[in-house]
Image (cartoon, grey):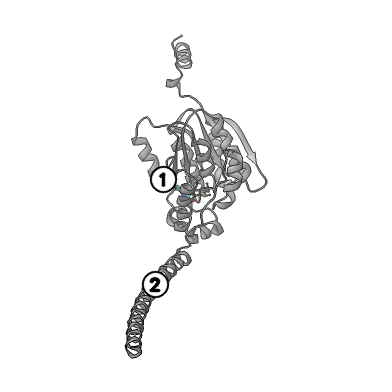
């Protein structure tokens, strides 16, 4: 009897041992799967880190919550590549806030330090569109000479990285529906806009090539694309190479304001005069004078 009971216990123990071994085998199998998956995750992390190191993937921009435009610009501006000062960014946004239109453009965007404030100021306006005209090309940037040091810097800067930073800033600031990229040199972009008959800018910020001929060409060639009474902003008006462009604007437009923030930073805003054809009364006066 006792022997029978002992044999039964032994059989039960053997059965339980077998079950434990089975369970242990399943656990080992699952551990192996987890280790495999951990290896895949580590591999992916390594790939992402390599991409970040090699291509310098930009960090995320974090606009503060809340609706105050100036606070938003104060927080976002230091996170953007470029040269626009806080004073100029706030001045640009004031121009946008005070003007009526919604068709804005910028020639020479770089990392968006002036374009993002313009777009933040315009984004709640119905139909707001901010055209970012910029080739992000080292060869275009030095097509026309400025100074040797300046040209050397533009030959070497990683404009692809700057472009990636700009695009991710546009997304982070929720401006993808407002900003339109025109990845062309200004002369080619102008031909495209001219072909879209009737398209006129309410505000255009010219901050592209600072070479004398190109700066002047940008002002002269883009003026006909301005809406009557539209605002043209020109950067670096105290640069020797930009003075011809500035003087052309002084002569052909009404000066809204010129700002100098010290020896290095200067800019001006100029209101285009309505063309005669768009000023029936003035046109009539002139015609009657001619006929008299
Ligand atoms: C001074 S940066 C612009 C800075 C920017 N607006 C800011 O406030 O930080 C000048 C930009 O003009 C671009 N550029 C140079 N030549 C150009 C051209 N022919 N057409 C359009 N953009 C040009 C350069 O690639 C460069 O990014």
Label 1: which secondary element: strand
What count of labels does the image hold? 2
Q: Mark 1 points at which residue?
A: 181
Could you tell me residue 232's position as x and y percent?
A: 52, 35
- CB-based contact (under 8 Å), mark 2 and mark 1: no
Considering every residue shown, the one lying at the far right of the view is: 262
Could you tell me residue 189's position as x and y percent?
A: 39, 43
Q: Is ligand 1 closer than 8 angstroms to the Cβ of mark 2? A: no
Q: Which of 95 and 223 is in front in this view?
A: 95
Q: Distance between the residues labelled 2 and 1?
A: 45 Å
Q: Residue at x 67, y 46 (%)?
A: 262
Q: Residue 162 carries which label?
A: none
Q: Is residue 241 left or right of residue 259?
A: left
Q: Which residue is drawn at 40% across and 45% down?
A: 182
Q: Name the residue under label 2.
A: 34
Q: Which residue is drawn at 45% across and 53% down?
A: 163
Could you tell me residue 291's position as x and y percent?
A: 43, 10
């Amino acid at each position: 009897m006792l022997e029978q009971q002992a044999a039964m216990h032994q059989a039960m123990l053997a059965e339980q041992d077998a079950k434990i071994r089975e369970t242990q085998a399943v656990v080992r199998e699952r551990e192996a799967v987890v280790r495999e998956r951990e290896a895949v995750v580590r591999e992916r992390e390594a790939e992402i880190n390599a991409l970040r190191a090699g291509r310098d993937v930009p960090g995320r921009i974090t606009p503060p919550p809340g609706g105050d435009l100036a606070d938003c610009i104060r927080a976002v501006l230091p996170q953007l590549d470029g040269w626009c000062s806080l004073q100029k960014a706030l001045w640009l946004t004031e121009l946008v806030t005070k003007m009526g239109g919604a068709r804005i453009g910028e020639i020479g965007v770089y990392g968006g330090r002036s374009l993002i404030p313009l777009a933040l100021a315009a984004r709640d306006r119905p139909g707001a569109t901010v055209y970012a005209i910029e080739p992000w090309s080292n060869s275009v940037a030095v097509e026309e000479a400025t100074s040797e040091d300046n040209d050397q810097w533009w030959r070497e800067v990683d404009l692809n990285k700057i472009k990636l930073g700009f695009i991710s800033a546009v997304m982070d600031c929720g401006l993808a529906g407002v900003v339109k990229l025109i990845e062309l040199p200004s002369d080619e972009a102008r031909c495209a806009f001219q072909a879209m008959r009737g398209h006129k800018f309410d505000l255009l910020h010219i901050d592209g090539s600072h070479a004398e001929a190109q700066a002047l060409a940008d002002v002269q060639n883009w003026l006909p694309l301005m809406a009557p009474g539209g605002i043209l902003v020109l950067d670096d008006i105290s640069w020797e190479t930009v003075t011809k462009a500035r003087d052309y604007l002084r002569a052909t437009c009404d000066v809204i304001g010129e700002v100098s923030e010290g020896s290095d930073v200067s800019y001006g805003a100029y209101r285009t005069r309505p063309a005669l054809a768009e000023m029936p009364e003035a046109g009539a006066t002139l015609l009657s004078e001619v006929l008299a």
